[in-house]
Amino acid sequence: MSYDFEVPVRKKRKEKKSETITLEIGQKVRYVFFSNITFEGIDENGDVILKDKSGNIKKVSKSLFQKYVEI
């Protein structure tokens, strides 16, 4: 399953441009200052589900996810 998001994507020289990308379940992302976070999908309330390498689950609102995620 995959989801489309409008997120900032880091380009050359650390410039960020917003692009629509498709995230697959299980894809690694960077969220705020956390790296090596796995995208796990969207729950029934529209929150994004993230999992760290220890298996801890975190739910964040879709708008915050789109603002602070890096691919």
Image (spheres, rainbow, N blue to C red):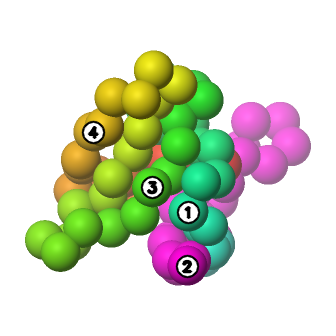
Disc 1 marks a residue whose amino acid type is: Ile
Query: How many angstroms separate mark 1 from mark 4 (CA)?
Result: 15 Å
Instruction: Please tell me which residue is depicted at 53% across the width and 43% down the height of the picture.
Output: 38
Horizontally, residue 19 falls left or right of residue 4, namely right
Question: Contact (CB < 8 A) between labels 2 and 1?
Answer: yes
Magenta span contains residue 29: no
The magenta-colored residue range is 1-19
Asked whether the viewer can see residue 63, the reply is no
Instruction: Please tell me which residue is depicted at 56% across the width and 77% down the height of the picture.
Output: 2
Query: How many angstroms separate mark 4 from mark 3 (CA)?
Result: 10 Å
> Considering the numbered disc 3 on the image, is that residue within a helix, a strand or a loop?
strand
Residue 25: mark: 1
Horizontally, residue 13 falls left or right of residue 27, namely right
Find disc 3 in the rendering and name its residue: 40
Image location (x, y in percent) of residue 46 = 21, 71
Disc 3 marks a residue whose amino acid type is: Glu
Magenta span contains residue 18: yes
Query: How many angstroms separate mark 3 from mark 2 (CA)?
Result: 10 Å
> Considering the numbered disc 1 on the image, is that residue within a helix, a strand or a loop?
loop
